[in-house]
Amino acid sequence: MLYAKGRKTKKEHRKKPRNLFLTITLALLPILIISGIAFSAYLSRPPALPTQEQGRQEEATDVTPGNSPVKETNGTTEETAEEKEETLTKPPRQYKENFYTFVLIGTDFGGYHTDTIMVASFDTAANKVNIVSVPRDSQVDVPGDYKKINIAYANGGAKELKRQLESILGFEPHYFVRVDLEAFPKLVDAVGGVEFDVPQDMDMDDGTQNLHIHLKKGLQLLDGDKALQLVRFRGYPNADLGRMQIQQKFLKELAKKVLSSANIPKIGTFIEIFSQNVKTDIGLRDLQWFAQQAIKLNPETDITVQTLPHLADGNYKGQNYLFLSPEGVVDMVNRTVNPYTTDISVEDVNIVRIEDSPAGEGEKGKLTEQKVLEYSTKMFLLGSAVSVPNLHGIYVFATAHLTSTY
C-alpha cells in the first residue's frame, strides 16, 4: 500500500545536501563568462541547432509489422492501435530560435553518484536563464526495483539521463554538463572569500563524512571551507527548502564577486578550476560564445531557479520517492525551459502517477547496515570494477545495488 504523505523511513546514509550543486553550477557560470573574454580571438557564430526535433520522424519510419512502438509502465509493456497511430501522425515540433537547453548534474565519489540534477535554458535573445531543479528522488518509469532518476547517469551516462528527462519534461536537452562538487570551495577561495550574513549559529559534527560545521551568526567573510559548511548545514528552518534559500542567497553574493573587475586577473585560476571539475559535450568555441552572451546577464534579475512540483511522497522497498505532478511539471516547463514554439502537454510526458506506482510500505525491502557493510567489504576485497576512490564511495554504490536487487 502506498503512503502518499508523511511516511518516514530510516534516513539514507548519504547526507550530502541535494541542492549544493545548484550553488556550484550557477557559481561556475561567471567562470564561463570571464573565460570567454580570454578566448575572444575565437569568437564564433551561435551554436547551430536543428530547426525541428528529429525523434518523431524517426519513430514513424521505424514502425513496421511486428516492430511496433511500445510503452513501458513499471516493467511491463503496453501498446494500442491509438498509440501507434499517434506516433505515426504527430508532426515534429519546431525549436525556438536563440534558445538553448542544458542538463546540469553534480556528482561526487569520482563522478559515479549523481547528487543533483537540473535542467537550464538560456534565451540569448532575451538574456534570460531559467533553471529547473529535478528532485533526485523522483520516481521514473523504468524496469527494476530502483526507480529514482538519480541512478540514470550511472546506468547509461548522459544519453540515458537525457532519455529519462525527456520522459518527464517532454523534451531532450541539447547539451550536457557534469560538475564535480569539489569545485565549490576552490572557487570561493579563488575570489578571496565571500562576505555573507550567516542567519544562525551552526554546530554539527558528522564523523562518517569528516564533516564538522561550526559557524557563528552574523556578517562575516567566509572562505571556501566555511562557505561549504554554510551550504551543507542541515539544521535550517523548513529543512531542504530553507537550505536552498540560503544557497541561492550565497550564490548571488558569490556571482557578484566573480564578476567584479578586481577578479579579471584571476582568469587563469578560474579556467583551471573549470577544466579540472567540469565535463561537457559543448565544444570550446560554442562554450566561448555562450560566455560572451552570458556576460550581459544580471545575476539578480536574469537568472531564475525553481524546483519541479510534486504531489506526494511514498516508499518502496525502504526507499523514499517523490511523485511529480504531471500538470504542475508541464506548466512549469512551458513557462521556463520548453525549447519548442508550441506548448508541451501532459500527453507528451510519461510521469509516474502515484496511483500507478508499485510503491508500498517497503518493510520487506528494507536494507540493514549489516547487509550493506557485508556487500561493501566483498566489493573491496574483489577489487570492485566500479570506479570509486574510497571506501565510502563503495558503500554508496553497495547501497544503490542492494536497493535495486534486494
Image (cartoon, grey):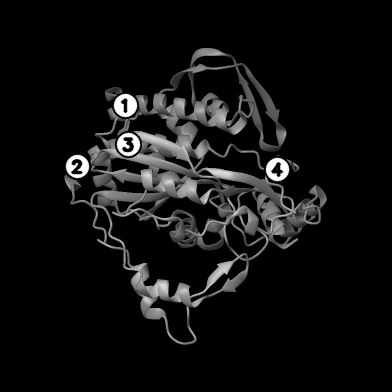
What amino acid is at disc 1?
Asn
Q: CA distance from mark 4 to mark 1?
A: 39 Å
Residue 107: x %, y % from top left: 53, 47
Asked whether residue 105 appears in the rendered view, the answer is no
- How many residues crowd mark 4 within 10 Å: few (<14), some (14–19), many (20+)? few
Identify the mark at residue 40; answer none if there is no mark. Answer: 2
| Residue placed furthest toward the top | 218
Q: Check disc 4 and report its element: helix, strand or loop.
A: loop
Q: Which residue is mark 4?
A: 13
Nearer to me, 217 or 79: 79
* Mark 4 or mark 1, whichever is nearer to me: 4
Q: CA distance from mark 2 to mark 4?
A: 46 Å
Q: Which residue is mark 1?
A: 263
Residue 61: x %, y % from top left: 36, 79
Picture quadrant of residue 145: bottom right
Q: Which residue is mark 3?
A: 268
Q: Residue at x 59, y 33 (%)?
A: 240
Q: CA distance from mark 3 to mark 1?
A: 10 Å
- How many residues crowd mark 2 within 10 Å: few (<14), some (14–19), many (20+)? some
